[in-house]
Amino acid sequence: MSEVMASARRIGAMMLRHYYVLRGSWPRLMELAYWPTMQMIIWGFMTQFLATNSSWVAQAFGVLLAGVLLWDTLFRGQIGFALSFLEEMWARNLGNLFVSPLRPYEHLLSMMMMSMIRTLIGVLPAALLAILFYDYSIFSLGLPLVAFFLNLMMLSWAVGMVVIALILRFGLGAENAAWFVIFMIAPVSAVYYPVTVLPEWLQYVAWSLPSTYVFEGMRAILFTGHFDASLFFGALALNVVYLAIGAAIYFYAFHRARERGALLQMGE
């Protein structure tokens, strides 16, 4: 009986330990409810739209596949950007990098380039397999696909800079933000359904995101064959603003981390 009680105390002690870890890390707490909530919101809007627009169902296949591939471009771009930083942090190499002549903006530009390379490596095979398995080619979008890709990459870099700033501020406790922050904009980016499905107050939020213009532009081409230049330039203008804000947050967080000596302490 005493052994059972001792075992229960040890189990309770380990549970208490993990409870303190959760309690002390808001990103970990947020993540627990985050994914079920995101799935419910996205597919709730999608189901609502399909239920009231049966004529759209006939063309839904190509639109959904294009949405999946373009969304993955945004996700892979952001996660590729963040991973370039996280890999240096896990290897405890940040201090070594920044005692070298490497400037912060040079590091930032290198992460952008690696983000693009990682994204192409990740998305191109999926796009080619879609042709083989489903006889669907996203390349049928033509040159506008390049405009969509560049706009999504720019947004992914802006989000990635904010994620890195969070990690510089909160350390490993914010590491999971690299995987879930980008999905916060998924429900209002109109990835799988038009903006008009959203409640009116949420539509204003949607139109403040460059990604919304990209996905609306993608659907315009697939349904009408017309490239809406106003959507492209709207996304581009917003991306310039978001990149400037993201860079300002990143450089401020980097400066504060260097002042605290945090760059030498971060790692596994």
Image (spheres, helix red, strand yellow):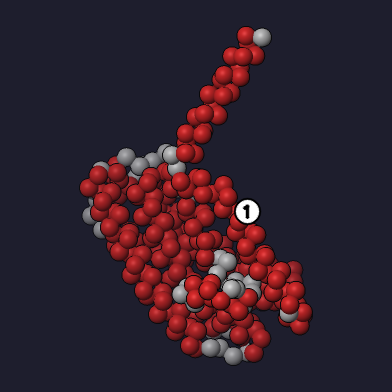
Circle 1 is placed at which residue position? 36
Location of the C terminus (image quadrant): top left
Q: Is residue 122 above or below residue 176?
A: below
Residue at horizontal 73 percent and vertical 74 percent from the top:
50
Residue at horizontal 43 percent and vertical 63 percent from the top:
159
Q: Secondary structure at mark 1?
A: helix
Q: Is residue 8 above or below residue 127?
A: above
Horizontal arrangement in the rendering, residue 152 relative to residue 106 (left or right): right
Would you call the spot at circle 1 few (<14 residues within 10 Å), some (14-19), or many (20 or more)?
A: few
Tell me where residue 84 appears, x and y as whole percent. Answer: 42, 54
Choose between 176 and 10: the one closer to the eye: 10
Choose between 33 and 226: the one closer to the eye: 33
Q: Does the image show residue 114?
A: no
Q: Amino acid at mark 1?
A: Pro
Tell me where residue 13 appears, x and y as whole percent. Answer: 53, 24
Tell me where residue 42 appears, x and y as whole percent. Answer: 63, 65
Tell me where residue 184 appears, x and y as whole percent. Answer: 52, 61
Q: Is residue 139 above or below residue 133?
A: below
Choose between 177 and 110: the one closer to the eye: 177
Residue at horizontal 60 percent and vertical 56 percent from the top:
37
Residue at horizontal 58 percent and vertical 84 percent from the top:
142
Q: How many marks?
A: 1
Q: Does the image show residue 163?
A: yes
Horizontal arrangement in the rendering, residue 66 relative to residue 50 (left or right): left
Q: Quadrant of residue 261?
A: top left
Q: Quadrant of residue 220?
A: bottom right
Horizontal arrangement in the rendering, residue 137 relative to residue 238 (left or right): right
Location of the N terminus (image quadrant): top right
